[in-house]
Image: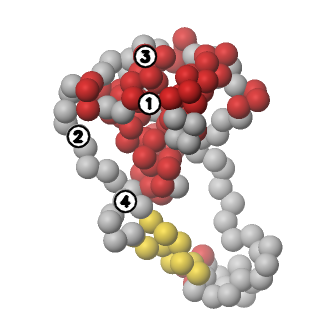
Amino acid sequence: LGHFRTMEEVLRVQRTEDGRGQSTVALKDFDAGEVLLREACLAVTFEASEAPWAAELRRKLKAMDGCCAWQYCLAVRCLSHDDPVRWEDFEGLEPLSAEGVCHLEELCGADAVDETSELSGASDLARCCLEHLKGPPELAFRLDRLAGRVARN
C-alpha cells in the first residue's frame, strides 16, 4: 500500500446500481504489477483432475451448453451445509463454509428469490445438476441463483 495506512485510502467498494454486486474503484494510480489484494478462491475446479462424478456432470453440461457449463460446475462447488446434498456420495465435494457463503453474497450481490416450487421454472442446466446430485427440486433453483452469482464475479 506504499505510504497509505489503510485499504480504504486506496480503494473504494461501491454497490452496483442494480444491487446485484459490488465493484472496486481505485482512488490512486497503481504501478504495473502492483499487488493490491490477495484472497483465496471461494470455489475452484480443474477439469483435468476432477473426480469421475464431476467429470461426468461437466460432460453432460457441456453437451447442453458449452458456454455456460462452467458456471454450473462452479455453482455445485458453492453449495453449503444448508443445501440438501448427500456430500458423502460425491468425492471431493465439500460444502462452502458459512463464511464463504457470506463472502459469495457480498461479492456477487443479492438476487430476487423465486418462491416457485415447480421444477419447470428451473433452467435445463440446473435440472441436469439436480438429476446428477439426486437432490430435491428446490436445489435446482438454488443452483440457478449460484450460477448467476458465479457468472457475475
Q: Is residue 146 above or below residue 47?
A: below
Q: Earlier in the sequence, mark 4 or mark 1?
A: 4
| Disc 4/disc 3 C-alpha distance (Å) | 28 Å
What amino acid is at disc 2? Asp
Q: Judge from the rendering whether residue 5 lies leftward or rightward of residue 148; answer left or right.
A: right
Kindly state the secondary structure of the residue where label 2 is placed. Answer: loop
Badge 4: few (under 14), some or many (20 or more) residues near its Cα, within 10 Å? some
Regarding residue 131, the answer to whether it shows in the image is: yes
Q: Check the image and report above or below for 41 versus 22.
A: above
Position of 4 compared to 62: left or right? Answer: right
Which dot marks residue 125?
1
Residue 20's label in the rendered image is 4
Q: Amino acid at mark 4?
A: Arg
Labels 2, 1: front one: 1
Query: Which of 130/22 is in front?
Result: 130
Rendered image coloring scheme: secondary structure
Residues marked 4 and 1 touching at CB (< 8 Å): no
The x, y position of residue 88, in whole percent, is 55, 13
**Disc 4 versus disc 3: nearer the observer:** 3
Which residue is situated farthest in the right direction here? 33
Q: Find numbered disc 4 in the image and state the secondary structure of the residue it sits on.
A: loop
| Residue annotated with mark 2 | 114
Residue 91, given in percent of the width and then of the height, sits at 63, 17
Quadrant (top left, top right, bottom left, bottom right) of the N terminus? bottom right
